[in-house]
Image: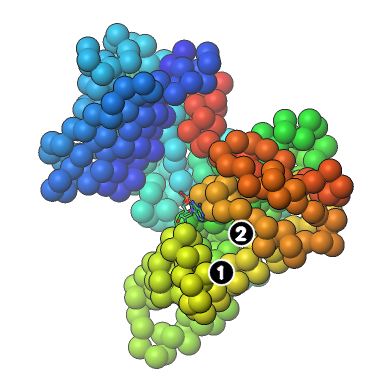
Amino acid sequence: MNVLVINCGSSSLKYQLLDMNTEEVLAKGLAERIGNQGAVLTHEAPGQEKVKFEQAMETHKEALNILMAALVDPNHGVLKSLEEVSAIGHRVLHAGEYYSDSIIIDADVIEKTELCNEMGPLHNPANLIGIRACQELLPKVPQVAVFDTAFHQSLPAEAYMYALPYEMYEKYHVRKYGFHGTSHKFVSRAAGEVMGKNIEDLKLISCHLGNGASLCAVKNGKAIDTSMGLTPLAGLVMGTRCGDIDPAIVPFLANKGYDVAELDNIMNKKSGILGVSGVSSDFRDVEEAANAGNERAQLALDIFYYRVRTTIGAYVAAMDGVDGIIFTAGLGENSVTSRQIICDGLSYLGISLDPVANSKRGEATIISDKDSKTTVMVIPTNEELMIARDTLALAK
Ligand code: AMP
């Protein structure tokens, strides 16, 4: 059974085709600058050269048409016909409180997802465009929505409620939702396998540290707290996002003359590692600058590490202990130094890293040594595979 995984952004479309008998990636690609000049779709299949389609793509449907033609192309295609696509899985950002799991898409799912557009204005409308385009192009193929918020719907009320007047929740659904749910679900399940234990018996902290970053406390297989909130701006310090700040800073700066849109832009696009360091939003650049003696770059990293470490501490308290800590995503999977620095401050958990294991990359592995009281792991995330697994389970 082949599953096509689609992730639509406002002007982009990422895809992977997986053979779910083997979980092997048959083809993948990315369409960029959809609706703009210079649109391009890059398609690749293992063992073949990358192919670039540089042609006008006014809509996501046109991009889908190109990718579907690429999948069955006699030269670089991997399928004989599109009938070999058994199901399509869509990454969807926000499901509000409507869905706590992935679901087969029907008119009702589309309507509920649309109701969540205002909470995910950059992503949900684009995700829906992708869903509708696939419905038009392959009307007989079952489609599944896999929501970034779904895994966090198991949070207890004391973790998801903000202490605002209750009517803000009732009228406007203002609460913590959390994101990166597909990643946290994938790596926490994989951690059970790596540790050789049943996830139902484990207390885990999943650290998704990429350009966007969030932590998730997973107790007995269920999310019980997470660091992002109503939107992905909350929690940790990120590439360009400020994470948690005193909410009174917003009216304070408004009184200095900044309007809502400017403040939103500053907090989302000009803050975080970029805002403090003044160097870059990319951790590699900031690490390099810090190593060369740039004090603000070092400060940005110190704030980042401090916030990760103190949030780990909060989740140890939330679960009354921890058995395993998982590092994943761009920085979590690749930065040996960051993992070392974050764990250096966790000696109260009896953590000691094995420097040789910690220097490995690209494979799921335990990086703590045999005496460590808490297991520390690196687990490469694979959101596409998680989406494909959920899609397969539902489409069957
Ligand atoms: P992601 O959003 O998961 O794709 O992660 C992207 C971020 O991971 C980039 O902004 C980099 O800052 C970071 N990253 C990737 N590789 C490394 C590395 N070897 N060392 C430090 N940071 C890295």
Check disc 1 and report the residue beneath it: 301
Image location of residue 116, percent across then percent down: 44, 49
Residue at position x 61%, y 59% in the image: 338
Q: Is mark 2 on a helix, strand or loop?
A: helix
Q: Which mark is residue 87?
A: none
Mark 1 is on which residue type? Leu
Q: Nearer the viewer, residue 58 or 347?
A: 347
Instruction: Name, please, the residue furthest toward the top.
Output: 80
Q: Mark 2 points at which residue?
A: 338
Quadrant location of residue 141?
top left
Residue 378, position in %: x, y? 64, 44
* Residue at x 33%, y 15% (from the top left corner): 78
Q: Do the residues labelled 2 and 1 touch (CB within 8 Å)?
A: yes
Estimate the x, y position of residue 180 in percent, counting from the top left.
54, 47
Kindly tell me whether residue 268 is visible in this rendering: no
237 and 252: which is toward the camera? 237
Q: Distance between the residues labelled 2 and 1?
A: 9 Å
For label 1, the crowd category at 10 Å Cα-Cα, with few meaning under 14, some 14 to 19 and many 20 or more, is many
Residue 95 seen in render: yes
Task: Say whether residue 374 is left or right of residue 333.
Answer: right
Q: Quadrant of residue 128?
A: top left
In this rendering, the answer to whether 114 lies above or below 157 is: above
| Mark 2 CB within 8 Å of ligand 1 | yes
- Say if disc 1 is inside 8 Å of ligand 1: no
At x 55%, y 49%, the residue is 334
* Displayed quadrant of residue 351: bottom right
Amino acid at dot 2? Ser
Does residue 173 sit above or below 367 in this rendering? below
Q: Are there few (<14), some (14-19), or many (20+) residues within 10 Å of tag 2?
A: many
Q: In this view, does 140 lie above or below 195?
A: above
